[in-house]
Image: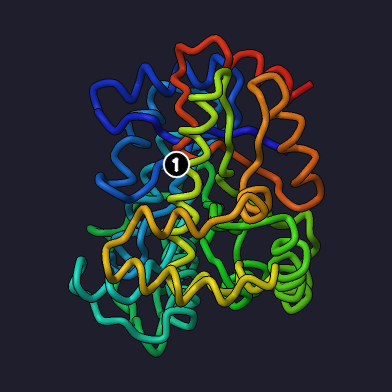
Amino acid sequence: MKLDIGLLTHDLKGIGAFAERAEAMGFDGLWSSETQHDPFLPLAVAATRTSRLKLGTAIAVAFPRSPMILAYTAWDLQAASDGRFILGLGTQVKGHNERRFSVKWESPGPKLREVIQALRTIWDCWQNGTKLDFRGQFYTFTLMTPFFQPPPIAHPRIPIFIAGVNPYMARLAGELCDGFHVHPFNSAKYLREVLVPAVEEGLRRSGRKRTDIQLAASIFTIMGETEQEIAQARQAVKEQIAFYGSTRTYEGVLAAHGWQDLSPKLHRKSVEGDWQGMADLITDEMLAAYAVSGTYETIAGRIKERYAGLLDRVWLYRHAKLTLDDPRWEKLIRDFHG
């Protein structure tokens, strides 16, 4: 199991030093997300300041960008990093696509399938000189002249990860992708009984093995050295679980534990703006299912114990308030790799 880290800053002036430090400390990968900032720009800086770290998006939203735009960006990042880039894509939900990005929401699963297929077709054209001729339901790419065609690169096989919560995306990842970004709102039970079997079904469809794909996830953790620190961490994770649980898309994660009746209650409170009331609905039993608790000395072992055989790459969710200057990281990394 690999221990990665998510970007703790999006200040482009500080990304280079952050990436260098993360690599020197022994992290295996660095992930950039698309929330308040562009997910690709930080990785362009990190690529020029590191030599070993895997660099990926977790995630970039797929549909607001043409697959051709994604193809160019990924090609350049793969070349700049000497083959260390991972293109992680997600669909986001209907409301964000339509109202934040102003793009049409249509058949997200089949459309994401075409994004993956189109990317591989475009990259094959650039690397091997094949004629560009992709014709799908949602995308058509048939024009590539020498002026716009980048030259071949040393590592043309760019890994594609897709993100998902439910079995459809897990099957799609197993069938077509190099990795699957498991949503942070997960449990070992949901992985074992729902997502991993779906990934394996997709693998069978394409004649591949479990070792041909990596499952990665950001993990909710509750850590602290004082009662106050632990209480703050618990509250933060409860709020995050409640936020995700209020969206119908994530109902299956609750249903795996028999808690599906909680979803409409959380949704109702979210509409009312009762954020504290939402968090209060998250019980200790739920917290134990969806988060890993421990001290800074024990958390690494507990993560490995819970997710052994289920996940291949993990990193701590952003509510774990550690900075790279915190000496507790060094022990955590050492324990994880020990």
For residue 160, say whether it is visible.
no
Helix, strand or loop for disc 1: helix
Q: Position of residue 330 (x, y in %)?
A: 61, 13
Q: Tell me if 172 is positioned left or right of 205 in this view.
A: left
Quadrant in which the N terminus is drawn: top right
Per the image, the residue denoted by label 1 is 236
Foreground residue, 77 or 209? 209
Numbered-mark total: 1
Q: Position of residue 249 (x, y in %)?
A: 48, 74
Amino acid tagged 1:
Ala
Quadrant in which the C terminus is drawn: top right
Q: Is residue 205 above or below residue 184?
A: below
Q: Residue at x 45, y 73 (%)?
A: 265
Q: Residue at x 59, y 49 (%)?
A: 217
For residue 98, say whether it is visible.
yes
Q: Answer few, some or many: residues within 10 Å of disc 1's Cα (few below 14, many 20 plus, some between 14 and 19).
A: some
